[in-house]
Image (cartoon, grey):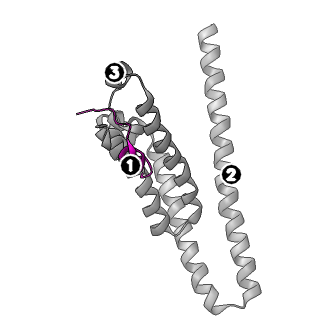
Amino acid sequence: MKKQKKGFINFICSLIPGAGQLNMGFEKQGISIMAAFWGIVALTAFLRMEWIATLLPIVWFYSFFHTHNLKNMSEEDFQAEEDKYLFNLDFILKNKEELLDRYRAIIAGVIIFVGVCVIVREITAVFWNIIPGFLYDIFYSVSSLVFGGTIGVCIVIAGVVMLRRKKEGEEKTWN
């Protein structure tokens, strides 16, 4: 049951991602925020890719300010607020087969890319013990440049594709 809370306990709960929402009865929002936060922590630890952890402050700040926005709503707005999963999780769960078929190549590409990153990270760790320090530094720098450059190129391509799709959509509406 949703209940607007404004006390010290709510403030303490707002410091833990998702706990403030759970404290006020927004279970779906709280669970999805907690899952996002701890999922990022788990991915960072499992893949040993520290740059993923840069997403943690975004999730934390969202959770903190969302809790305080809920707290400061009028009673009518608070009661009208819908408890729903973040990231359109309801839609994703209902249409998972269709989405998997539609985005299979992208999902496979991301999985392969992450796998290659993990393999290179492990190979780099082995090389640390075998090759001299300056060669290791060169190998590490080149591999970081390749993966960082690949991510950058993918982001640019995604932006260009989005712009083209928007342009094509605008042209279709004008014709």
The residue under the point 63% across, 21% down is 168
Q: Is residue 32 visible?
A: no
Callout 1: 10 Å neighbours few (<14), some, many (20+)? Answer: some
Of badges 2 and 1, nearer the viewer stands 1
| Residue with the mark numbered 3 | 80
Residue 69 belongs to magenta span? no
| Residue with the mark numbered 1 | 13
* Gap in angstroms between the C-alphas marked 3 and 1: 22 Å
Q: Secondary structure at mark 1?
A: helix
* Residue 76 on image: x %, y %: 35, 19
- The boundaries of the magenta stretch are 1-16
Tell me the tag on residue 152.
Answer: 2
Q: Secondary structure at mark 2?
A: helix
Quick one: label 2 or label 1, which is nearer the N terminus? Answer: 1
Q: Quadrant of residue 6?
A: top left
The residue most toward the front is 8
